[in-house]
Image (cartoon, rainbow, N blue to C red):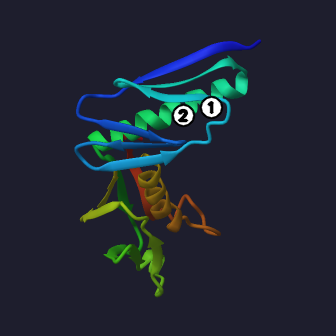
Amino acid sequence: MKKEILREIEIPKEVEAKIEGNTLIVKGQKGENSREFKIGKLIFEKKENKIILGCKKATKKEKKRINTFTSHIKNLIKGVQENFEYKLKICFSHFPINVEIKEGEAAIKNFLGEKIPRIVKIPDNVEVKIDKDIITISSLDKEIAGQAAANFEKSTKIKSRDKRIFQDGIFIINKAGRKI
């Protein structure tokens, strides 16, 4: 059954939004964020201080896309108002782990006593701070910040050893403001 679905997303006063084709550009206090959407049959326009997203005869697929795009737009708006922040904890029991940041890369040294450091690439527009055993990752874009945090966690995944004994690694403890 096809029906009309329209979503209206409020734009706060301190945020400026502009639509160019299929690209939404959002400017705020912290900086600028942009994203390209594959609109297809959907209505995508800006009226006054609202972004309107919808479809006259929406199927289940269009409804899913509208809801997904609505979440992405809300994250873009939230990102330019306040940074998305992920916190990771460095945990070790056997060998002390050292993390160093140099020019867009992080080197994880002495993980499980390995002589060769593990290298993690840090995406552009991401700020990484290390305070003893807590790594803080912040960015305007939620997806980029989440990917950077996942890169750290994935790089210290232990394979072919007993996970009950070898519990060393870097783990996400705070995901964009909520505890895990």
- Check the picture and name the quadrant holding the N terminus: top right
Q: Contact (CB < 8 A) between labels 1 and 2?
A: yes
- Check the picture and name the quadrant holding the C terminus: top left
**For this view, does 143 lie left or right of residue 101?**
right
Q: Residues within 10 Å of mark 2 (few under 14, many from 20)?
A: some
Q: Residue 47, percent across and down?
A: 41, 24
Q: Residue 43, percent across and down?
A: 58, 27
**For this view, does 155 lie left or right of residue 33?**
right
Q: Amino acid at mark 1?
A: Arg
The image shows residue 49, relative to residue 179, as above or below, that is above
Name the image quarter holding residue 54: top right
Along the viewing direction, whichever of 163 and 60 lies nearer the viewer: 60
Along the viewing direction, whichever of 54 and 130 lies nearer the viewer: 54
The image shows residue 112, relative to residue 144, as above or below, that is below
In the image, farthest residue toward the bottom: 115
Residue at figure coordinates x 49%, y 32% from the top left: 71
Residue at figure coordinates x 43%, y 64% from the top left: 123
Q: Amino acid at mark 2?
A: Phe
Q: Which mark is residue 65?
A: 1
Q: Residue 146, percent across and down?
A: 45, 51
Which residue is label 2 attached to? 69
Name the image quarter holding residue 91: bottom left
Q: Which mark is residue 168?
A: none
In the image, farthest residue toward the right: 1
